[in-house]
Image (cartoon, coloured by chain):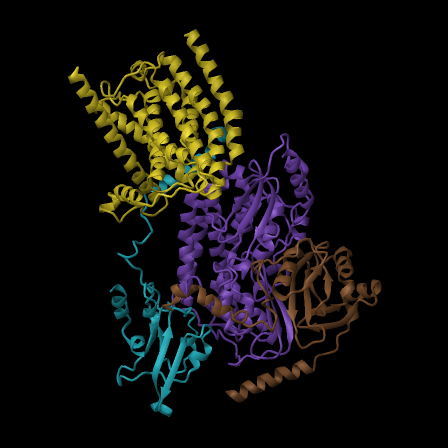
Chain colours: A cyan, B purple, C yellow, D brown
């Protein structure tokens, strides 16, 4: 009763906010500071090139295109057996839902999830990635966006 | 004019709400007044998305509520009929986007039940852990927005701080923060990364202390109590008849948690309490979810301890092309918001013949008009918050 | 004569410039303090630590499109925010910041404050009514009931101190306090604070604009500068209420060592901080509960306070 | 690998065929219904530990009331009502009820088959929560419920044509819909 009259319940709350008034903020000032995503983060998809030979790891088997729930991948390949390479590989990131199924199903590890996530753009064509753009270093994408 | 109003009034009385007749005493207390219609939503700060309520008011007192939904209808069930069993997983993520692992969980369990797939135990523990983390994150977001609706805006950011920790855990293990798509038919996508379990344990240590923060601001606060106690009451019997499930019905004293009642996965091996409070009001539902967060934290801890000791496969041997037998299953799981069930009709092909998703929010929303009848406008907000709806789930 | 007029004008300019500056920076201060209480930073982008934020906000609001709903009563719709702001700013005229520094000294100072404040309420009611929107109307209705009843408690809670001070003149009230009146009148002080929260629409009593229920209450339909007027009026009222509390309960500019105006500002900012602090902490009352508190708890308390004060004064 | 898969599938199919005969009289639900309404049950099935009863259309409300009110059964919670469209069947529409007993923790599935023009009695009087589920079944599959208090569309707009979850309803909307939509929005979507 006395506690209620003295508004103890309210004072507890006031104490809590006052305490946090002097602690360090936990927020990140986004465009200035950025958090690095975890290695598994599913960002934009990249087409991996073999570092030694400079050829695509992809063998254009088309499994990624088939498994894609939003059907945003188109693949065309040339050559036979081990020589088979993609000549056309398009991902429409305006449709992509970043589920990672294509990366998961790829039998040769030809695709990977980069940690690039800043895909907001005024130009929707920018999101339609072709084979050259897909195999670029993803840090370059950022520059194209900022332009 | 007066005669016409009287006529309208009588018609309205005869029509009643969609669930029953309006209590006439509430309708006109002492003075004769005219009804006042107000459109709450689909764009309104506290309808948690695109819910639209048409309230008819006497002053600020609610006479009748009509709930209009469908603004977020994406045709998930139709889409599912055109996709393979595997491709449906990302669709289920987007039902309750605040607890997507729990949404995946129900679906993969349903397909596994249909195909009789035995899932490795380690995978089961990982799934349960993720689902419980999702429950914590969903309840945190619920508490955040519920408190914000009632005006306590600081709780919002405290809750988000802890939710961020859970999302970080999700990102670390699954690669997605909100839309995890982590579960697979027969297991999970990957094993847990190194150092993950330590982070989980750290979270389990910190979290109960942080709950104290919210308690300081809400638990005994007289304003919070006066806004929630005896508001939007619904009895157990009525609640069940109106389809309430999950925390919403446990706040009315019904001890019914599908994790205990019909244990699935490894819930029967885990030690946790079902949170039941019998206040029947908004405050009781707050208490239920508050306790549930702490219980989920316990479950996560147990899972982490188990997973630390064991290793093994996280994926059962499942054919790449899934062709379940002809038949139908109904798999109900306890999602953060209530009973989530998938009803799959299979015709033996790669794609489900029919996938009906019974979502908790949809069923819980049916009880809203009954709850808020006779209350004030401000209580509608509290009631919506207390049944914890997500429009992605309501409209599917 | 010209000399006096010039001096008066100078005072007016100084007081209003300082008042508007404070009002503008009060928004910044509020966002910053609440930000830190919520473990975030508040405004950080415009200028160092977001110090130019109020100016940026002002510019933005100035260039915003001015929308008038078709259902609105145009004249009152335009007039209401101006009424609100003018009523709030006019009150600064009699605030004695220091013994000799004020625009004008009225011997009925406190009465003037209470009466002008109740005119300011009309602005809000008119805004709610003339917007032609249902949410605004509900907000206006709420504010009508809320403010009229809370003015009663605000007035009554000041009567106790006034009996001791023996004057309505703000300067005399301060000079009559050898010890701050809060010592003699703690109940009146608490009631004053609560009533003040109700009077200036702050959490936990911000029902006229309860954003989660009524979107933005009486100013739902307002945009651009008209919205800014309401915004400024609200914060100006907050300053006024704090200033009155300082004068009546904390002995105004009196204090050792430091100059009087600084003491005044320090004491005032304590109240301002308190109002912001409360906003960060508490949920919002429901409309009927709020009125219940006023009429069932505060009115008996404040009347008892007056009676007790009177009896004690007779005996001593 | 592929052979393995085939084997697994074959195994599954074999299991399917070897489905053991179930003694349906061991279920109290079946006994009680048979006792009271001997003609009500058309067909019984037991698959993946789920009991399915196909009920004659006219009996559905009576059976539901029995299930709810009988103290031994006490099916007090309606989980779901769902419509399924089987265009090849003689009676193309099917309503599926999932009912749960909170006290006994058991579930039962009832089914009602309907021809295209037939109506089924609404179970709103038994469980008020059926209201929205039935509206949804009407909206999505086009099943009409008699004596429903308020049978309108629930998810789709009032003026929508057709019932999307029917099998003959194309995935991309009604024919011409997409073109019409594109024509209306073309200035904005030109860039797409």
Q: Report the number of numbered marks.
A: 0
Q: Nearer the viewer, residue A22 or D19?
A: D19
- Please tell me in which quadrant of the rendered image residue C55 appears: top left
Residue C131: where, in percent of width, then height?
44, 38
x 52%, y 46%: residue: B40
Q: Nearer the viewer, residue B264 or B202?
A: B264
Extreme-front residue of the structure = B1
Residue B89: where, in percent of width, then height?
50, 70
Tell me: B34 left or right of C224: right
x 27%, y 28%: residue: C265
Residue B388: where, in percent of width, then height?
53, 52
Q: Nearer the viewer, residue A134 or C86?
A: C86
Q: Is residue B369 above or below residue B345?
A: above
Q: Nearer the viewer, residue B5 or D8?
A: B5
Is residue A1 visible in the rendered image? The answer is: no
Extreme-left residue of the structure = C3
x 21%, y 20%: residue: C8
Tell me: C125 left or right of B39: left
- Which quadrant is home to the N terminus of chain B? top right
Extreme-bottom residue of the structure = A80
- Please tell me in which quadrant of the rendered image residue A60 appears: bottom left
Q: Is residue C170 above or below residue C207?
A: above
Q: Is residue C16 above or below residue C172?
A: below
- Which quadrant is home to the C terminus of chain B? bottom right
Is residue B380 visible in the rendered image? The answer is: yes
Residue C161: where, in percent of width, then height?
39, 17
Tell me: D145 left or right of C101: right
Extreme-top residue of the structure = C315
């Amino acid at each position: 009763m006395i506690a209620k009259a003295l508004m103890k319940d309210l004072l507890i709350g006031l104490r809590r906010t006052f305490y946090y008034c002097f602690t360090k903020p936990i927020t990140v000032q986004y465009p200035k500071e950025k958090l690095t995503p975890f290695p598994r983060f599913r960002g934009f998809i990249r087409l991996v090139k073999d570092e030694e030979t400079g050829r695509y790891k992809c063998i254009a088997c088309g499994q990624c295109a088939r498994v894609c729930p939003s059907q945003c991948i188109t693949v065309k390949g040339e050559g036979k057996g081990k020589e088979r390479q993609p000549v056309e590989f398009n991902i429409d990131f305006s449709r992509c839902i970043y589920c990672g199924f294509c990366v998961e199903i790829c039998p040769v590890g030809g695709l990977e999830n980069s940690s690039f996530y800043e895909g907001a753009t005024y130009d929707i064509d920018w999101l339609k990635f072709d084979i050259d753009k897909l195999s670029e270093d993803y840090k370059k994408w950022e520059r194209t966006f900022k332009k | 004019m007066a005669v016409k109003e009287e006529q309208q009034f009588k018609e309205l009385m005869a029509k009643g709400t969609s669930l029953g007749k309006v209590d006439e005493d509430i309708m006109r207390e002492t003075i004769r007044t005219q009804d006042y219609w107000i459109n709450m939503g689909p764009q309104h700060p506290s309808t948690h998305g695109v819910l639209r309520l048409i309230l008819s008011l006497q002053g600020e007192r609610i006479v009748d509520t009509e709930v209009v939904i469908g603004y977020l209808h994406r045709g998930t069930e139709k889409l599912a009929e055109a996709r393979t069993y595997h491709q449906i997983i990302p669709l289920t993520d987007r039902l309750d986007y605040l607890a997507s692992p729990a949404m995946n969980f129900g679906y993969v369990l349903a397909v596994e039940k249909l195909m009789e797939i035995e899932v490795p135990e380690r995978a089961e523990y990982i799934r349960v852990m993720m689902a419980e983390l999702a429950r914590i994150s969903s309840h945190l977001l619920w508490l955040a927005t519920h408190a914000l609706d009632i005006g306590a805006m600081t709780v919002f950011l405290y809750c988000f701080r802890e939710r961020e920790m859970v999302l970080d855990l999700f990102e670390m293990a699954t690669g997605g923060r909100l839309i995890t798509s982590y579960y697979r038919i027969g297991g999970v996508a990957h094993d847990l990364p190194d150092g993950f379990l330590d982070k989980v344990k750290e979270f389990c240590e910190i979290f109960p202390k942080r709950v104290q923060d919210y308690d300081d601001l809400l638990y005994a606060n007289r304003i919070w109590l006066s806004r929630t106690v005896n508001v939007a009451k619904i009895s157990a019997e009525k609640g069940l008849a109106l389809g309430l499930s999950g925390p919403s019905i446990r706040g009315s004293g019904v001890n019914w948690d599908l994790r205990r009642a019909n244990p699935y996965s490894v819930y029967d091996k885990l030690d946790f309490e079902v949170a039941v409070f019998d206040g029947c009001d908004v405050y009781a539902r707050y208490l239920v979810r508050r306790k549930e967060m702490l219980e989920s934290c316990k479950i996560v801890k147990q899972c982490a301890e188990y997973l630390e000791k064991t290793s093994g496969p996280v994926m059962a041997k499942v054919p790449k092309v899934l062709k379940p037998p002809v038949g139908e299953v109904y798999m109900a799981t306890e999602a953060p918001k209530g009973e989530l069930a998938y009803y799959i009709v299979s015709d033996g092909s790669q794609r489900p013949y029919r996938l009906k998703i019974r979502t908790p929010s949809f069923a819980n929303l049916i009880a809203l008009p009954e709850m808020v009848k006779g209350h004030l406008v401000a209580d509608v907000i509290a009631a919506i918050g207390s049944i914890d709806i997500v429009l992605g789930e309501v409209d599917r | 004569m010209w000399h006096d007029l010039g001096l008066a004008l100078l005072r007016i300019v100084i007081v209003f410039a300082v008042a508007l500056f404070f009002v503008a920076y009060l928004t910044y201060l509020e966002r910053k303090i609440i930000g830190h209480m919520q473990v975030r930073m508040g405004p950080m982008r415009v200028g160092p630590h977001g110090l130019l934020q109020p100016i940026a906000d002002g510019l933005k609001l100035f260039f915003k499109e001015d929308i008038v709903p078709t259902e609105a009563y145009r004249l009152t719709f335009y007039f209401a925010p101006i009424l609100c702001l003018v009523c709030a700013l006019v009150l600064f005229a009699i605030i004695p910041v220091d013994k000799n520094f004020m625009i004008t000294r009225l011997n009925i100072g406190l009465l003037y404050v209470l009466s002008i404040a109740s005119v300011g309420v009309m602005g809000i009611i008119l805004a709610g009514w003339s917007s032609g929107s249902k949410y605004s109307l509900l907000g206006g209705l709420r504010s009508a009931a809320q403010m009229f009843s809370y003015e009663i408690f605000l007035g009554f809670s000041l009567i106790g101190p006034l009996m001791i001070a023996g004057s309505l003149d703000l300067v005399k009230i301060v000079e009559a306090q050898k010890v701050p009146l809060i010592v003699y009148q703690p109940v009146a002080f608490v009631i004053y604070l609560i009533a003040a929260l109700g009077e200036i629409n702050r959490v936990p009593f911000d029902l006229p604009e309860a954003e989660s229920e009524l979107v933005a209450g009486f100013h739902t339909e307002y945009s651009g500068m008209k919205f800014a007027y309401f915004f400024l009026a609200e914060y100006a009222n907050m300053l006024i209420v704090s200033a009155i509390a300082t004068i009546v309960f904390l002995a105004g500019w009196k204090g050792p060592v430091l100059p009087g105006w600084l003491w005044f500002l320090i004491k005032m900012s304590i109240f301002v901080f308190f109002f912001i602090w409360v906003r960060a902490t508490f949920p919002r009352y429901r409309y009927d509960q709020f009125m219940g508190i006023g009429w069932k708890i505060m009115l008996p308390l404040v009347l008892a306070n007056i009676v007790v004060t009177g009896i004690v004064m007779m005996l001593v | 690998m592929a052979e393995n898969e085939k084997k697994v599938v074959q195994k599954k199919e074999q299991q399917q065929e070897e489905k053991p005969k179930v003694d349906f009289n061991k279920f109290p639900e079946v006994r009680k219904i048979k006792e009271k309404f001997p003609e009500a049950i058309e067909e019984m099935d037991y698959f993946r530990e789920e009991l399915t009863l196909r009920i004659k259309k006219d009996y559905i409300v009576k059976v539901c009331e029995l299930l709810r009110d009988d103290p031994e059964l006490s099916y007090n919670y309606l989980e779901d009502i769902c419509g399924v469209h089987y265009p090849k069947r003689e009676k193309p529409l099917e309503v599926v009820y999932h009912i749960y007993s909170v006290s006994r923790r058991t579930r039962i599935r009832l089914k009602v088959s309907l021809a295209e023009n037939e109506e089924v009695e609404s179970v709103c009087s038994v469980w008020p929560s059926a209201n929205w589920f039935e509206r949804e079944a009407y909206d999505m599959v086009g099943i009409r419920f008699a004596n429903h208090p308020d049978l309108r569309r629930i998810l789709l707009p009032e003026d929508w044509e057709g019932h999307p979850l029917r099998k003959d309803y194309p995935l991309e909307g009604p024919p011409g819909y997409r073109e019409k939509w594109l024509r209306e929005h073309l200035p904005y979507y030109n860039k797409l």
